[in-house]
Amino acid sequence: MTPDRSWMRKTWSRINSAILRGLVGRSKDATSLPLVQVEWTADRTSDEVEYMQPQGLYFRPKVGAEGLFLAAAGDRAAAVLVDAQKRDDTPGGDGIGEGEGGLYYAGTFGVFLDSTGKVHLGAKSGSDFVALAAKVKSELDGIKSDLDAVKLWAGASGHTHVCAAPGSPSDHPVPPLVLTYSPTSPAATKVKAT
């Protein structure tokens, strides 16, 4: 009995095309997952391929992005594309240390986590620490408290202040003003932004 070479050739072809590098020809965001057209060899294209991403991330890939075209059991009808990105859009090559990285778009980091645990928003290196809402409120409450004390102090004598001539005794002694506010920084210690 002669082996069926066409069956072997088809099986071998499916095995060889189960994992390929694919290039995004088009993309659209019309369903819960972005759909892409994938060019996976010089003359082969698959349309309406789901672009799979890790839990919590959702990005529509750009035309020309490269990714892994995965066809389970070689079945291209159930294929997906993963990890698509354009090589010239990655922010790598700028001295990123081991374990550092973040979210980027078109070659620029939007969120970067450095080796000290600081989060930088808007760039690889944020220029200033962000203000924390609770600390800002505390600072404003302290300023308000002192302004209330000044208001109370100014109204304590029950009159409008008229400057007496130097050396003349005042008919209403003015109580001493005691201010308690001492400024502190409302800045975060772990988050910087540009």
Image (spheres, rainbow, N blue to C red):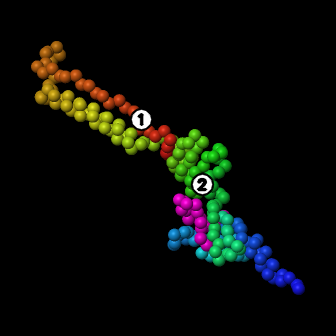
First-in-chain label (1 vs 2):
2
Judging depth in this view, the residue of 103 and 160 nearest the camera is 103
The residue at the point 56 percent across, 46 percent down is: 113
The residue at the point 35 percent across, 37 percent down is: 139
Q: Nearer the viewer, mark 1 or mark 2?
A: 1
Residue identified by numbered label 2: 107
- Magenta span includes 181: no
The residue at the point 19 percent across, 29 percent down is: 154
For label 2, the crowd category at 10 Å Cα-Cα, with few meaning under 14, some 14 to 19 and many 20 or more, is some
Measured as percent of width and height from the top left, residue 140 is found at: 32, 38
Residue 193 — which label?
Answer: none
Is 194 on the left or on the right of 170, as rendered? right
Q: Is residue 125 above or below residue 33?
A: above
Q: Splitting the image into 4 quarters, where does residue 117 fall?
A: top right
* Residue placed furthest toward the right: 1
The residue at the point 56 percent across, 48 percent down is: 112
- Magenta span includes 64: yes
Q: Splitting the image into 4 quarters, where does residue 77 fall?
A: bottom right
Range of the magenta residues?
Answer: 49-66
Measured as percent of width and height from the top left, residue 96 is found at: 64, 46
Measured as percent of width and height from the top left, residue 156 is found at: 16, 28
Residue identified by numbered label 1: 185
Q: Secondary structure at mark 2?
A: loop
Is 108 on the left or on the right of 171, as rendered? right
Q: Decide whether the magenta segment is chiefly helix, strand or loop.
A: loop
